[in-house]
């Protein structure tokens, strides 16, 4: 099973409160995260221990240019980020490299799977 891992402590809070149901990843990740896949939503820094939060289904995968992200994408990614420019600055911190508005991103919408 694959994992959608989140490194930011702020994302962990959003995931636990179920305010986040979308992630935007740099590059074309369609082959890694195909629609209808079941994944673990996890949190933790790269190369360190991760914590499983819950299983999820990948509902929708969209490939876009960074500049083509919508307010809907941004709201579901992180309701505190209000513009593509703010997200670009945030991504440069996460990926530790320069990112441009014409770079390709993958928008992944997911929903929690509740086991009964």
Image (cartoon, rainbow, N blue to C red):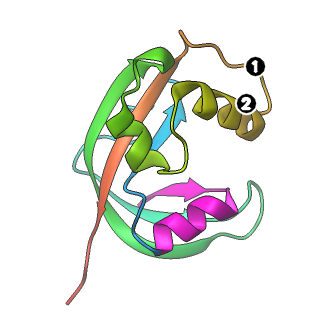
Q: Which residues are magenta?
A: 1-16
Q: Is residue 28 visible from the viewing direction of this image?
A: no
Who's the residue at 48% across and 16% down the image?
67
Quadrant in the rendering for residue 51? bottom right
Residue 92 marker: 2
Quadrant in the rendering for residue 85? top right
Could you tell me residue 4's position as x and y percent? 49, 55
Q: Is residue 94 visible from the viewing direction of this image?
A: yes
Foreground of the two, 15 or 5: 15
Picture quarter with the N terminus = bottom left
Picture quarter with the C terminus = bottom left
Who's the residue at 31% across and 40% down the image?
34
Q: Is 13 above or below relative to 47? A: below
Who's the residue at 72% across and 40% down the image?
94
Could you tell me residue 76's position as x and y percent? 38, 49
Who's the residue at 58% across and 67% down the image?
12
Foreground of the two, 26 or 91: 91
Q: Could you say whether the residue bearing mark 1 is in a helix, strand or loop?
A: loop
Give yes or no for residue 53 being in the magenta stretch.
no
- Give the alpha-carbon distance from disc 2 to disc 1, as whole Å: 6 Å
Q: Earlier in the sequence, mark 2 or mark 1?
A: 2
Residue at the farthest top position: 102
Q: Is 107 above or below relative to 46? A: above
Q: Is 41 above or below relative to 92? A: below
Q: Could you say whether the residue bearing mark 2 is in a helix, strand or loop?
A: helix
Q: Are marks 2 and 1 in contact (CB under 8 Å)?
A: yes
Residue 98 marker: 1
Q: Dot 2, crowdedness within 10 Å: few (<14), some or many (≥20)?
A: few
Q: Dot 1, crowdedness within 10 Å: few (<14), some or many (≥20)?
A: few
Q: Is 50 above or below relative to 27? A: below
Give yes or no for residue 14 being in the magenta stretch.
yes
């Amino acid at each position: 099973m694959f994992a959608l891992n989140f490194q930011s402590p702020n994302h962990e809070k959003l995931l636990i409160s179920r305010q986040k149901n979308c992630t935007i990843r740099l590059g074309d990740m369609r082959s890694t995260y195909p629609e209808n896949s079941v994944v673990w939503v996890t949190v933790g820094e790269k190369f360190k221990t991760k914590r499983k939060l819950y299983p999820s289904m990948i509902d929708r995968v969209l490939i876009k240019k960074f500049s083509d992200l919508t307010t809907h994408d941004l709201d579901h990614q992180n309701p505190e980020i209000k513009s593509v420019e703010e997200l670009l600055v945030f991504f440069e911190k996460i990926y530790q490299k320069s990112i441009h508005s014409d770079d390709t991103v993958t928008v992944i919408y997911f929903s929690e799977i509740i086991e009964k």
